[in-house]
């Protein structure tokens, strides 16, 4: 991909279902530490920009999506850096998916003495990335510690709900689709199912939500009202 010409990339995108440019790091500084011979903006980001240009100029064709990958935790990169760039790529270049690969040291390499990245950090990055891509979230909605990383002990969506919905729960009968997507346990399909169901009847208990194929409505229970009432729920850990 790096250095490819427009027509070459266009042909590839007609044949493949996805094309990949591994950015490796979220900034030129991080990339310098990982792969000093690569150029972040003019070489790597440019290929993603070119792919999006091709999609815009050929709107009637089925063309490959674009993906990228980041190495996480080897060179001081932060979750804030990684997710800020991911958000930009989703919005400006219609990236299909960002992959986050936790660092693991390999013997006889320059980084062999570095500690491996906690796999929970990788998992939290994926959770947050999907919120940015599929749920209409913004990086500013996520909780970051002073070091620029997210807490490892908190699901990003539930961490937001604890701050914003625990004391002021959301009324399911009047909430908008975007508001419903802020509630733990409710995804895009669940939100659409709620919007359809409440046109026909009042939703008054958690079991009704379960019948709408919301798999774990107990996750939502601490943060919602059902027809003006808090549903009964058991306390859960973050």
Image (cartoon, helix red, strand yellow):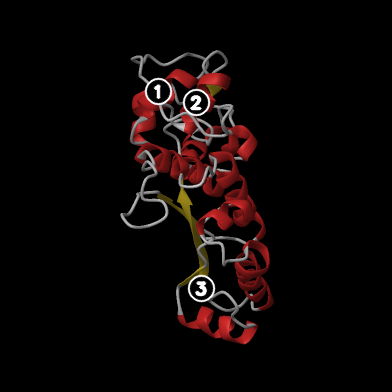
Which of marks 1 and 2 precedes in the sequence? 2
The residue carrying pointer 2 sits among few (fewer than 14), some (14 to 19) or many (20 or more) residues within 10 Å by Cα, namely: some
Residue beneath disc 3: 64
Distance of mark 3 from mark 2, alpha carbons? Answer: 35 Å
Which of marks 3 and 1 precedes in the sequence? 3
Q: Nearer the viewer, residue 173 or 123?
A: 123
Q: Nearer the viewer, residue 58 or 51?
A: 51
Q: Considering only vertical position in the picture, is 236 above or below 158?
A: above
Q: Tell me which residue sits at (58%, 57%) in the image.
A: 32
Left or right: 208, with 195 as reference point: left
- Which labelled disc corresponds to residue 238? 1
Q: Tell me which residue sits at (39%, 26%) in the image.
A: 219
Dot 2 falls on a residue whose secondary structure is helix
Q: Nearer the viewer, residue 108 or 178?
A: 108
Q: Considering only vertical position in the picture, is 108 above or below 216?
A: below
Dot 1 falls on a residue whose secondary structure is loop
- Asked whether the residues under the numbered discs 1 and 3 touch, taking CB atoms below 8 Å apart as contact, a structural biologist would say no
- Asked whether the residues under the numbered discs 2 and 1 touch, taking CB atoms below 8 Å apart as contact, a structural biologist would say yes
Residue beneath disc 2: 159
Residue 183: percent from the left, percent from the top? 49, 30
Which of marks 2 and 3 precedes in the sequence? 3
Residue 7 can be seen, yes or no: yes
């Amino acid at each position: 991909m790096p250095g490819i010409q427009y027509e070459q990339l266009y042909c590839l995108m007609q044949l493949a279902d996805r094309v990949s440019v591994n950015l490796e790091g979220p900034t030129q500084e991080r990339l310098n530490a990982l792969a000093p011979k690569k150029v972040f903006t003019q070489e790597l980001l440019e290929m993603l920009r070119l792919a999006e240009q091709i999609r815009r100029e050929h709107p009637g064709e089925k063309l490959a999506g674009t993906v990228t990958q980041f190495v996480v935790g080897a060179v001081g990169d932060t979750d804030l850096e990684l997710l800020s760039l991911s958000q930009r790529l989703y919005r400006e270049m219609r990236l299909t998916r960002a992959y986050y690969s936790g660092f693991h040291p390999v013997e006889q390499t320059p980084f062999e003495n570095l500690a491996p990245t906690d796999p929970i950090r990788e998992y939290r990055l994926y959770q947050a990335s999907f919120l940015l891509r599929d749920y209409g979230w913004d990086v500013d909605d996520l909780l970051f510690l002073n070091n620029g990383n997210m807490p490892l002990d908190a699901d990003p969506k539930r961490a937001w709900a604890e701050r914003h919905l625990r004391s002021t729960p959301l009324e399911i009968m009047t909430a908008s689709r975007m508001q419903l997507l802020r509630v733990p346990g409710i995804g895009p399909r669940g939100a659409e199912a709620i919007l359809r169901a409440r046109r026909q009847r009042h939703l008054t208990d958690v079991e009704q939500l379960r019948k709408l194929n919301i798999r774990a409505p107990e996750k939502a229970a601490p943060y919602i009202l059902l027809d003006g009432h808090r549903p009964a729920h058991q306390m859960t850990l973050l």
